Amino acid sequence: MIGVCIAGATGWAGRALVDGVLAADDLVLRSAVARSAGGMDLGVALGRSEIGVQVHASVDAALDGVDVMVDYTSHASVKANALAAIERGVAVVIGASGPTAADYAEIDAAARRRGVGVISSGNFSLTAAMAQAAAVLVAPYLPRAEIIDYASATKPDAPSGTSRELAERLAIIRRPVVDLPIGETDGMRAARGAGIAGVQVHSVRLPSFSVSTEVIFGLPDERLTIRHDAGSSAAPYVAGTLLAVRRVVGRVGLTRGLDTLLLEGR
């Protein structure tokens, strides 16, 4: 049995993941982290009956008997949480948005020092992973690409973790071509989006969106668009997250992208 701690267990994605872990025959939910519910039974914190799982206010207090910590907190705390777990020799699955490429380099180095694994994905949806795999497949042949990132009006971070990860992955494969350098743009240069590893990313924040990511590749007189749209529930992220929980045990260092995990050995 793999002992699991869920950080952000009372949040939108965390609630769905709690049910996924509880239903799994090979996983056991040891603890949870939620600052607003510290000291409570997790079931009570979720508005249910007691389930015998304590909620802690911090990651450090929640890691006894834990093999894997899953983080679905926020961009403000995910890096510190991951490093705290790694220091305790606990493997980590990161589903929260926010860490930069430099943050992930630090997390990877810490995980290698401690001999533990970390799996991170900007989106643990299986269909989102396939969309990213498709973009990675065509990137060597279509060097002109930009990303449009759609999310709800109240999403605090921009771009989404899905779009940031995709931009960084594309740049590793082949730095995108920009025919007119952004610095030479007339008018408001900010209208050209944010440059992430040389890829322009445009974030749209409006009601009715959950998370949608669109990458547009262009050639003269033709375009290829790859787009993923998420629904209003967190259910699509559960299967991919649990797959990562099972695969991270015994690994060393950082693996980025659910698509990387799914396509290993192929």
Image (spheres, rainbow, N blue to C red):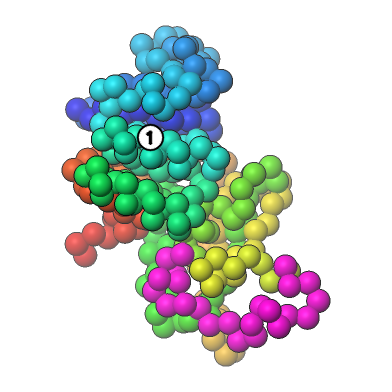
What residue sits 40% from the left and 15% below the top? 54
Q: From the viewer's perspective, is 60 left or right of 64? A: right
- The residue shown at (40%, 80%) is 140
| Relative image position of residue 188 (x, y in whole percent) | 78, 72
Q: Pick the quarter of the image with the C terminus.
A: bottom left
Q: Residue at x 55, y 65 (%)?
A: 196
> Which residue matches tag 1?
84
Which image quarter holds the N terminus? Answer: top left
Magenta-span inclusion, residue 203: no
Q: Is residue 23 visible?
A: no
Q: Which residue corresponds to the image point at 56% horizontal and 52% vertical from the top-left?
A: 160
Residue 257 placement (x, y as % from top left): 37, 55
Residue 254 falls left or right of residue 149: left
- Identify the element where label 1 is drawn: helix
Residue 27 picture location, percent across and down: 26, 28
Q: Alpha-carbon neighbours of circle 1 within 10 Å: few (<14), some, or many (≥20)?
A: some
In the rendered image, residue 207, in percent from the top left (x then y), is placed at 71, 46
Q: Is residue 87 above or below residue 196?
A: above
184 falls in the magenta region: yes
The amino acid beneath tag 1 is Ala
- Residue 2 visible in the current orientation: yes
Magenta highlight range:
168-190
